[in-house]
Amino acid sequence: MKYWIWLTQIPNIGPVLSNRLLEKYENPIEIYKATEDSLRLVKGINSRHIESIQSSKSLEKAEEILDKCQRQKILILTKENYKYPYKAKQLEDAPAVLYYQGELKNLNHTVAIVGVRRCSQEIKKKCVEITEKYICQGTTVISGMAKGIDACASTVCINEGGYTIAIVGNGLDICYPSEHQLLMEKIREKGALLSEYPPGTKPMRYNFPRRNRLISAWADEVIIIAPGKGSGSLITADYAKKYDRKIEIVWEQ
């Protein structure tokens, strides 16, 4: 497992190049052992990338992350695991490693429900109505645990016996926003928390567009409720289009 983590921690090597490396070498141990001449045959790789791989052979950071995960009961999902949904793992920018807590079930059908942070009671009522419909169908509800619509959808799932996955933009040992501590605990208990960031990763602003891409990647459908101009949920919509997911915008503002 530490070699999988090592792969994700190499500077200048993002998910796209990681996946190209995995296509050639099949597993991270073989990437770790690869020679410079062999690496040059990988599509899209350049001298800077090769230098990053060859100069990052220490496993210390990967071992530290693995130790934190074990101590904090954070599980690790790699692309070779059957629990990693096929529709998500086949994307060129799919993370090689994900971190999760809770129960990660086999997913038959999923819907992402995201939207405006500050919403009226009327908009919340619409969110409850939509979420309940999908719960009745046995559909997994995915959200980003953000304020507003995301939190509303997750809360409805928990209260009505549905299954929900919250995908966050920080390490799973950190609750963001902080006022969602109880919600996070309930999702961990009755659903699953998921992140591509190892424990200790703070909720930096640039993490959230990547989080939004993951929400779209794991969803079959994306419902966006009352998105405002410049809303982060519109980034989720852009990725949903890129990934050819079904999109519905409700109550456009």
Image (cartoon, rainbow, N blue to C red):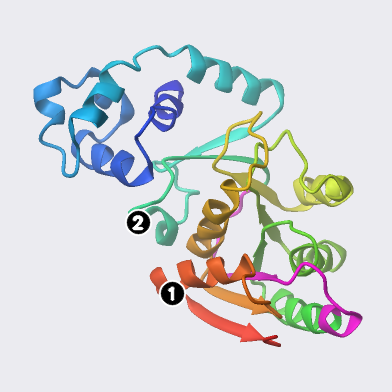
Query: Judging from the image, what secondary structure is the residue with disc 2 in?
Result: loop
Q: Residue at x 47, y 50 (%)?
A: 84
User: Viewed as shown, does residue 21 lie left or right of 68?
Assistant: left
Dividing the image into 4 quarters, which one contains the C terminus?
Answer: bottom right
Extreme residue in the front direction: 229
Residue 241, numbered circle: 1
Query: Judging from the image, what secondary structure is the residue with disc 1 in?
Result: helix
User: Viewed as shown, does residue 252 lie left or right of 188?
Assistant: left
Membership of 11 in magenta stretch? no
Q: Residues within 10 Å of mark 2 (few under 14, many from 20)?
A: few
Q: Nearer the viewer, residue 209 or 18?
A: 209
Q: Is residue 57 visible?
A: yes
In x, y percent, where is residue 156?
83, 68
Membership of 117 in magenta stretch? yes
- In the image, residue 200 sits, relative to residue 117, either above or below, namely above
In x, y percent, where is residue 34?
19, 22
Dividing the image into 4 quarters, which one contains the N terminus?
Answer: top left
Q: Amino acid at mark 1?
A: Lys
Circle 2 residue: 90
In x, y percent, where is residue 90?
35, 56
User: Viewed as shown, does residue 74 lie left or right of 176?
Assistant: left
Q: Residue at x 54, y 42 (%)?
A: 196
Q: Amino acid at mark 2?
A: Gln
Q: Residue at x 62, y 65 (%)?
A: 232
Q: Is residue 32 visible?
A: no
Query: Which segment did they paint magenta?
Result: 104-124
Q: Quadrant of residue 173?
A: top right
